[in-house]
Image (cartoon, rainbow, N blue to C red):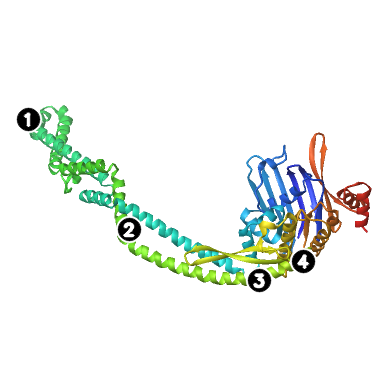
Amino acid sequence: MLELLRIRNLALIEDAELEFSPGLNTLTGETGAGKSFILRAVDFLMGERMDKKLVRPGANKATVEALFVLPDGETVIRRELSAETGRSRVYVNDVLSSQPTIRDMGARLVIHTSQHGQQKLLSPAFQSEILDSFLPDQSLPAEKNDRLAALNDVLERKKRLSEKFKDLQKQRDFLEYQRKEIDNVDPQPDEENELEARKKILKDREQAGECLQNALNVLHGEIGLLDAMTLLNREMEIIARLFPGFDEDREAIEELRMRLHDLDSRLRRGPKDFDDDDPMSLDDIEARLFELAKLKRKLRRGLDEIVDMKTEIDDSLSFLDACALDMKNLGREESEAAAALKETLAKLNRARKKAAGELAIRIVDELTDLGFSEHVKVHFDFDARELYPGCDDMRGRLMWVPNPGQPAQPLDKIASGGELSRFLLALVTMRGQDGREADAAPSLIFDEVDAGIGGLTLNSVGNKLRALADRQQMLLITHWPQLARMADRHFLIKKEVVDNATYTRCERLEGGEIKCELARMAGGGEQGAALAEKLCR
């Protein structure tokens, strides 16, 4: 049950709070006062979109809050609409939630019918949905949808596979040419960088070899440095013996001579990492790099891209070779999915035809209670909609005979606005008869469902609304005083202008206030007052 609704900064509503009661709650007021907008706020709360322009000028955001009392406890839902971005946020019991979650909750919280609902009633697709909603086994429509989705998935995969096969088949010769070019060169991942690194090492070694030979030539040339140092060392020994002051110089010469002999040995051996174990010569590396560069120019790709390209080509050609088997497997899946769908449709179509007869009888009973002729007849016609060859979805369409002697025709061909209102009320009434306790049933919202009716029919509609409100909570917008007087709680929606600003106000009426509003609804004056007095007895 919807116990409390609060709306702030939405359109002309600055701050409105409505505390509803069980049973029948009516909302009345002049046309344009904002009655329907109150109910639109409920729709917004239940996940419907709303334009940011509807945030009241000067406010940062609009807020709609509602307190629902359910068998398992209270639930508070709040939704905010940003004036700047148009985005909304929704909270359930002060915890941030999502709009899909709220929409799922909405089905068990609120059923909203309106003149828009009457137009939906004219849609054959909606009429088929109505029939499905009264099926004893509610799993059948969902099972059909799941199996249809599974079949469509197979068909989509088959289509993509076929399109890919046709596309690659056209490119097969070119792909094989590209693969041959790549196989002839056989590039390896990162090969170019490795060759450049090896090329640098070989060039460095070549330069180092030249330097080693030049150093040895210095040590052993015509005026070899080692021979010169040996001779110099011999002479310095004599000089140092004769002149002790040269002894340090002799020692330095001797040390240098020994170091040069050590250098000579190491130069002859070469550096430890100087062994050339690369199987490729510098010319071999240059030739390979040229081959790779030519392949890159030919294919207009980098070497790493070419390596990846080879894998892609191999995969594409393998796909072409294996495609026949894949198509065969998908064909088997398609047959199995189609057979499963056909089986479900057979059960669903049988259930629909059985439910259609029972539902038609119930609709007639309700319509008779709502003032239709006792001769009114209703039945469902079925149109086959082919979902897949051999899989027909039988969609039910409402047909009716309002008066004896007339042929059955679709509802949208002959029903007036008042008749549609009563049809909608009859269907909602039947949906409410599902065995749930009143506090577990969703709140019913009727937005001028009484449009286009009057006289005795109005009394029948009023009695039906009253009986329905006794089972579950109802919010009713009406312009008829005969209906408003049945309310357990009456709200007046009115528009006021204060300091050049327009406001929509919501007031709960009691006692004499109700009588005054009923008199206004009845046309005012003495005649209106008299009718109001009569209605309030």
Badge nearest the viewer, 2 or 3: 3
Residue 136 found in image quarter? bottom right
The reply to whether residue 364 is visible in this rendering is yes
Res. 319 mark: 2
Residue 381: percent from the left, percent from the top?
62, 65
Q: Amino acid at mark 4?
A: Thr
Badge nearest the viewer, 1 or 2: 2
Residue 123 found in image quarter? bottom right
Q: Which residue is mark 4?
A: 368
Other-residue count near label 2 (Cα within 10 Å), few / some / many at <14 / 14–19 / ≥20: some
Q: Which residue is mark 1?
A: 223
How much space separates mark 1 and mark 3, taking CA atoms?
Answer: 126 Å
Residue situated in front as seen by the camera: 316 or 334: 334
Q: Earlier in the sequence, mark 1 or mark 2?
A: 1
Q: Secondary structure at mark 2?
A: helix
Other-residue count near label 4 (Cα within 10 Å), few / some / many at <14 / 14–19 / ≥20: some
User: Relative to residue 231, is residue 481 drawn left or right?
Assistant: right
Residue 115: percent from the left, percent from the top?
72, 53
Res. 357 mark: 3
Badge nearest the viewer, 4 or 2: 4
Q: Earlier in the sequence, mark 4 or mark 1?
A: 1
Residues under numbered marks 4 and 3 in contact, where contact means CB atoms less than 8 Å apart: no
Other-residue count near label 1 (Cα within 10 Å), few / some / many at <14 / 14–19 / ≥20: few
How much space separates mark 4 and mark 2, taking CA atoms?
Answer: 67 Å
How much space separates mark 2 and mark 3, taking CA atoms?
Answer: 54 Å
Q: Secondary structure at mark 4?
A: helix
Residue situated in front as seen by the camera: 36 or 242: 36
Q: Amino acid at mark 3?
A: Gly
Q: Secondary structure at mark 1?
A: loop
Taking the view exactly as shown, the residue that stands out farthest to the left is: 222
Residue 279: percent from the left, percent from the top?
16, 49
* In the image, residue 348 above or below residue 230: below
